[in-house]
Amino acid sequence: MRGVRTAKTTGAAVLAWLVALPLTDDPRPVLAPLTALLVVQLTLYDTLRSGLRRVSSVVVGVLVAVVLAEQVRIHWWSLGIAIGASLVIGRLLHLGDAIAEVPISAMLVLAVGGNDVAASGRITETVIGALVGMLVSAVVAPPLYTRPASDAVQHLAGVTAEVLRRVADEVAGEYTREQAAAWLDAARALGRDILRADQALGRAEESLRLNPRAFDKAHAAPSLRSGLEALERTSVALRGICRALADRVHSGSPEQVYAEDVRSALSALLRDLADAVEAYGQLVGSEVVGAPQDAGLREALAAAWVDRDRVFSLLRGGDRLQTDAWELHGELAANIDRLLHDIDSEARAELRQSWPTRARLPRPVTAARARLRRPTSGPPNPPR
């Protein structure tokens, strides 16, 4: 990908020079390739935005210089006025990173006394360079960054599942305060992976805008964004689970950790949750390529609901609700339910129907295959 971008940038600069030679009076129209070099960005949308901003910046700077040159010659104070006025106008026009082009153009044109040839030449070369840069970016393999974003979302699901499996393995024994604190730290550390996934997704969303190669990828952005948001909520629920287990160690109750029967059932539940979270990430990845595969998620969720009922039944049994720890039982149960609902396969399937596609209605064969893939009897309705 870097090699393609280097070739595109180099080609755009050379082409801008060749196009500018017959269209301008400058025998060395270096401004055209320089503009093309600056215009070509990672995505087509960024390139178009950069090109429009740079052309606007140069035009505004030239106009400021021409108007000022009619009144005064270049002095330190007139130079200050040109720079100040250029920056103010640039900010009002929201020119972003290209705002420096406004005072630069104003100073260069003002230095030659507002010469019309210099002014028009600078505008012409800038327009040529910007147009060539935008054209090359649009024609030569405009990149799509959906694959890196999909990989980042699946990686987030994977590391979340790793934390769940770690807790599942260690909660089966009489875990210590140090272990519980480590679980909580690991759950909090997921924030870094969420941030990286969000950055990758932001780039993917930009690459899809105005991109002719994104004709059949209209669903990719909402799929990845909703998947990331669900996994972010899952990480919050996971922190709640770890917090409840850590608070249990510090509660001072007769059962400083849960009894063996609860710990065994909870360990099985957390493993099923890990499988479900990982399957959810895989489902998001399959949606991006247009072939949703949710069988693994359905299977993991069905097992998780069964284990969830068993854990809650044990927590309600005996004298456990008669102790001061009932609030921790409720906190643990609430976060487990949140996690299960955040990655619900049925809700995901309904959400998928609202995403933009080339054909809003499924083809008959596709619809028939979808019905065949759907199990005849789903998991039992979760307790509400």
Image (cartoon, helix red, strand yellow):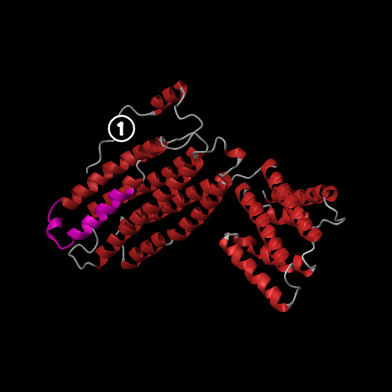
Q: Quadrant of residue 78?
A: bottom right
- On the image, the x and y values in percent for residue 192 come to 47, 60
Residue 105 appears anywhere in the view: no
Between residues 356 and 102, which one lies in front from this camera angle? 102
Kind of residue indicated by mark 1: Gly
Left or right: residue 95 versus residue 374 is right
Left or right: residue 143 versus residue 333 is right
- On the image, the x and y values in percent for residue 327 come to 19, 60
Q: Residue at x 44, y 49 (%)?
A: 228
**Residue 37 forms part of the magenta stretch:** no
Left or right: residue 291 versus residue 303 is right
Q: Residue at x 71, y 45 (%)?
A: 136
Residue 332 appears anywhere in the view: yes
Q: Residue furthest bottom?
A: 76
Question: Circle 1 sits on which residue?
Answer: 378
Q: Residues within 10 Å of mark 1 (few under 14, many from 20)?
A: few
Q: Which residue is drawn at 68% across and 67% down?
A: 103
Main secondary structure along the magenta-highlighted residues: helix
Q: What stretch is highlighted in magenta?
A: 317-339
Quadrant where the image shows the C terminus: top left
Secondary structure category for the residue under label 1: loop
- On the image, the x and y values in percent for residue 314 come to 19, 50
